[in-house]
Amino acid sequence: MNIKDDASYLAFATGWGAVRKLPEKSAYRSFDVISDRLWSRRKGGVVQLEKNLSRVEPGATPEQLRTMSRESMRKYFRYWCDAFRMPDWDKTRIVDTFECVDEYRLVDGLAQDKGVIVALAHMGNWDHAGAWATLTHAPLTAVAEKLEPERLFEKFLAYRESLGMQIYPTGTPNVIDTLARELREDKRIVALVSDRDLTARGIEVNFFDVATRMPAGPANLALRTGAPLFPATLWYEGPRAFAQIHPQVVVPATAPSGDDAKDRPGYDAAVTAMTQQIADAFANGIADRPTDWHMLQKLWLPDLDPDRLAASDAAASRDGEQG
């Protein structure tokens, strides 16, 4: 038994239960207080959040960035309060407190009978969005970052699955093959958080006029399966949660298709072009609502340590050669 992990799990589980029992206003007010305390310490993720927001709003003063980061942290903690309390929401509340802008795009995409791929940024409440989509349109599958300790991740997994979602942890063997099969056979919605992949496998894109990397997975799946791919951005507005489905990502005319697309000419160019379209849609959505974007980690390539990035790329290349 790992005592530290066990203690972390017990503390988290106890807190989860306590938040669910509090009156609603008290619960959200307490999360505002926690958020403000962490924000005021100006450590780690809060400082990085402000650096990231300065890329989005390059003309903002330090005081304006502080105000933005405080609001962003409050919305981030609102997401967590939602996450704790949503298991007690009935289906009517899940549906009635969520609104999807340009929902017709999702409807039209599902009508193609190939499933739908949705690329998400670190915004709003994707658990609420996933539950709403499952209840109103089609079963949803997502890939989630694995949390430590494992018992904590399993609790989150059970919670998300209780909402009707199928969740695979990052690092699941052959997960792209599994997602492709679910798109083809079950016509599911596959949702992938897609605004950060700093490994050598990430696709370099221009994001707010600065280079970063985003995952190839959404474009890869679209080429393999023919499923329509839509970027989506999410936000809070008053008591409601929102999502916007952006225009479908255009597949280049010369792009290969099918399970062997990755091994055929034109694949790399197609994935790069498609991932850039996702980045552009995210940039538009984030620029409209920057305080709903809770990116608390380094994102842009110039912000990374070059030696560490080069070592990571070299390691990924060696792994690829061995594979």
Image: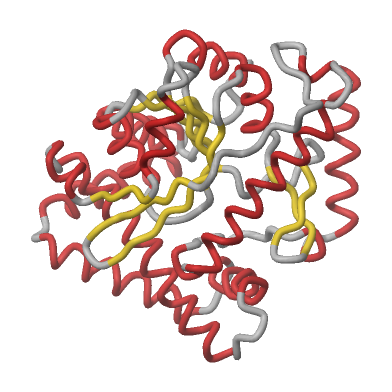
- Is residue 70 visible in the rendered structure shown here? yes
- Quadrant of image for the C terminus: top right
- Depth check: give the residue in front, 233 or 298: 233
- Is residue 163 visible in the rendered structure shown here? no
Q: Is residue 196 left or right of residue 120?
A: right
- Depth check: give the residue in front, 247 or 34: 247
- Quadrant of image for the N terminus: top left
- Depth check: give the residue in front, 315 or 291: 291
Q: How is the rendered protein coloured? A: secondary structure
Query: Where on the picture, by quarter, is residue 133?
Result: top left
Q: Reply above or below: 275 against 220.
A: below
Location of residue 126 in the rendering, given as x and y in whole percent from the top left corner: 40, 45
Q: Reply above or below: 169 against 185.
A: below
- How many marks on residues? 0
Q: Is residue 321 left or right of residue 45?
A: right
Location of residue 140 in the rendering, given as x and y in whole percent from the top left corner: 39, 27
Determine the residue positioned at 79% across, 58% down: 211
Determine the residue positioned at 61% across, 17% down: 225
Location of residue 303 in the rendering, given as x and y in whole percent from the top left corner: 77, 65
Determine the residue positioned at 54% across, 44% down: 247
Q: Is residue 313 left or right of residue 285?
A: right
Q: Reply above or below: 138 against 207.
A: above
Determine the residue positioned at 89% across, 21% down: 265
Q: Is residue 76 left or right of residue 175?
A: left
Query: Where on the picture, by quarter, is residue 95?
Result: top left
Location of residue 23 in the rendering, given as x and y in whole percent from the top left corner: 8, 60
